[in-house]
Image (cartoon, helix red, strand yellow):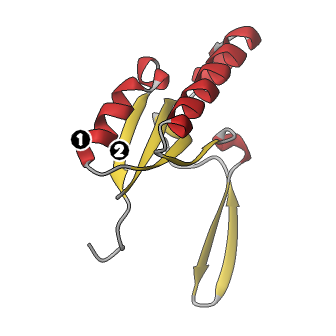
Amino acid sequence: MSYLLLIMEPIGQRAERTSEASHAAYDTMIRFGETLNERGVLVAAQSLASTKEAVRVEVRDGERRFIDGPFAEAKEMVGGFYLLNCEREEDALAIAAECPAAQWCTVEVRRLAPCYE
């Protein structure tokens, strides 16, 4: 079964870190992904750029709209993800608890499923 670990970062957290601290956190997350790969549960993982670079796309009545920030006020942003293949939800939750980012972010665990569920 597939589960997505969403790394939910507080807005502005990246700007508060020094360059050295940012690189150290990133390296820690890379090493965590490598261990998940070695365990055979990692499908994909990526870090995402800040929401400052995001563009939202809407199509209404055939009209496309591209909207860049600022967006609705939010306290968190999706900073990255790990896509896992685990046998049970408990396995995905255990991995989320092992994730280094759980020390400075919230790790949201979501099962992949059709949108009609």
Name the side, left or right, on which 58 lies relative to 3. right
Q: Which image quarter: residue 16?
A: top right
Mark seen at residue 109: 2
**Where is residue 2 drawn, in percent x and y?**
39, 57
Q: Secondary structure at mark 2?
A: strand
What's the residue at 67%, 14% (across, down)?
Answer: 24
Residue in the foreground of this view, choosing between 87 and 58: 87
Assign a secondary structure to mark 1: helix
Which residue matches tag 1?
90
Q: Earlier in the sequence, mark 2 or mark 1?
A: 1
* Three-letter code, disc 2: Val
Q: Position of residue 100 (x, y in %)?
A: 48, 21
**Is the residue 44 above or below the residue 9 in the image?**
below
User: Position of 12 compared to 90: left or right?
Assistant: right
At which x and y percent is residue 94? Answer: 30, 32
Give the vertical position of 5 relative to 104 (above or below): below
Front: mark 2 or 1? 1
What residue is drawn where x is 36% and y is 73%? 115
Mark 2 to mark 1 CA distance (whole Å): 10 Å
